[in-house]
Image (cartoon, helix red, strand yellow):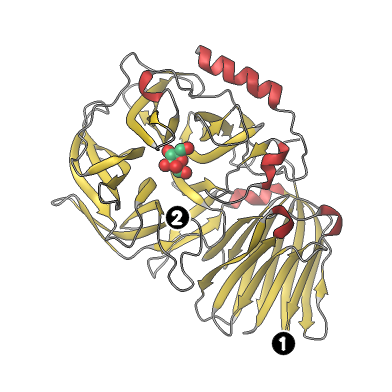
Amino acid sequence: MYNQIKEAMSVLKEKSEIIDDRYRLGYHIMAPANWINDPNGCIFYNGKYHVFYQHNPFSEKWGPMYWGHVTSKDLINWKHEIIALAPSKEFDVDGIFSGTATINPENNELVAFYTGHRWINQKDDTFEQIQGYAISNDGINFVKPKNNKIDIEVPKDSNHHIRDPKVWHDGHMWNMILGNSTIDKRGRVLLYKSKDLSKWTYVGVLAESNGELGYMWECPDFIRLEDKDILLFSPQGINEEGEKYKNYNQTGYVVGKFNYDTNKLEHSKFYEIDYGHDFYAIQTLKDNKGRRIAIAWMDMWESIMPTQEDGWCGAMTLPRELVLMKNDRIKMKPIEELKDLREEKILDNDNVFVSDKKNLQLGWENDFMELNLSVEGKSNFSIEFNSDNDEKVELQINLLDRYAKLIRNYETKGIEESYRYTEISDMNNIDIRIFIDSSSIEVFINDGEYVFTSRMYPDKNNRNIVIKTKEKINIRNMRVWNLKNIWQ
Ligand code: FRU
């Protein structure tokens, strides 16, 4: 363990006294205390799942970035490990930014690729970003080789935003992509190739904004589902377009085919992958069962984060399995293992009728819950997760008008009312699976065809879950479970 990690670990230990645990999560990845953002280096290595994350061990606000670390045998029960990477070199002195971990098949070492960040002048937002790497034999302790900078060609029309390496082997060569922005402020992804993970050749721009897709593309990931090549990324600066892109920043994908002659991705338009308020910087891993599993940061830049008052901030979403549907859109299925979180079933009813005359009040006693509802018939209805003072998250399902909407309002916490929206396909029945953790909600419609992920801040003394409709609906079945608190 190098000194910078020792120091950070001791501060973290002192500070892991959370001031107030009202919003602490029960079954999501979070740090012992203080700030976290993007998932990094997600990988299945030596029999365990590893998720690293952007972490400031010294404060509940973003600052110098380290890589925090959790491991799990089952993607459900997570264990905090020591901090994996800390700033220690001149080029990474102000932060170990996002990146990947990959296994070197020659020696089974885990290689972490990251972006070294160094401020030139923080006030003017001028900085230098250089890619670096570190190595581990056990997946826990990393060393940075003496010269661990990665020497790459940076295209002349690039500005200083160049970061978030994703590295993978495609069967022929190693590939590295980087999020980048041009001098004239268009987001794009650069592609590099290597035979041996050490010498990298710049091959060109994999994909780029036509001017409408934002000024910077962060945290790219390039995957194959079925026989399609898919670029996942988080573009910053897309303008709102009708009901689309109503978030501070977006995360989504384009689907296409990689052309090995031109080294370009010929692709579809951009689709959002999650329609909630708090889903950013998605990263994936392929596990030993062949599944493509995705995790994202469950917060959003520029948004109000009420847990900062309590001495912590940030979490990861639940792991989801990515599946490409026939219409070339990605489904994010809650992974099968999530059923292992279930403790007692607190509700199990068939054929529950709700009408304009009678709401269904479910109560809301527990912080950690899963709700499954199957609703029959084409109708419009809503599920409200409310607190006494009109503060709430409301999920509106409009099968008649073919849209779903998640409205959120926590004015007393400084979060003004806003909503996120998606069109939905024509359907007569709908299945809804909802995971409530103390301060988060994840809604999976039809097994992940449409997903909403948002943070919520209910007043625990006055909570209620209410199903409402202006018509009549039949809830064919409704099951509610209490879920386990993995951190206890
Ligand atoms: C995305 C991001 C990355 C960067 C990291 C810094 O959320 O801005 O582009 O590497 O966060 O913490």
Residue 412 position, x and y percent, is 74, 56
| Residue kind at label 2, given as amino acid type | Thr
Q: Ligand 1: which quarter?
A: top left
Residue 209 position, x and y percent, is 29, 57
Q: At 52% across and 22% down in the image, what residue appears?
A: 140
| Residue kind at label 1, given as amino acid type | Glu
Identify residue for label 2: 251
Above-or-below relation of 42 to 207: above
Residue 263 position, x and y percent, is 18, 49
Per the image, label 2 sits on a secondary structure element best described as loop
Above-or-below relation of 1 to 373: above
Lower position in the chain sequence, tag 2 or tag 1: 2
Identify residue for label 1: 471
For the residue pair 201 and 14, the one nearer the viewer reads as: 14
Q: Quadrant of residue 7?
A: top right
Classed neighbour count for the residue bearing mark 1: other residues with Cα under 10 Å, few (<14), some (14–19), many (≥20): few
Residue 142 shows in this picture: yes
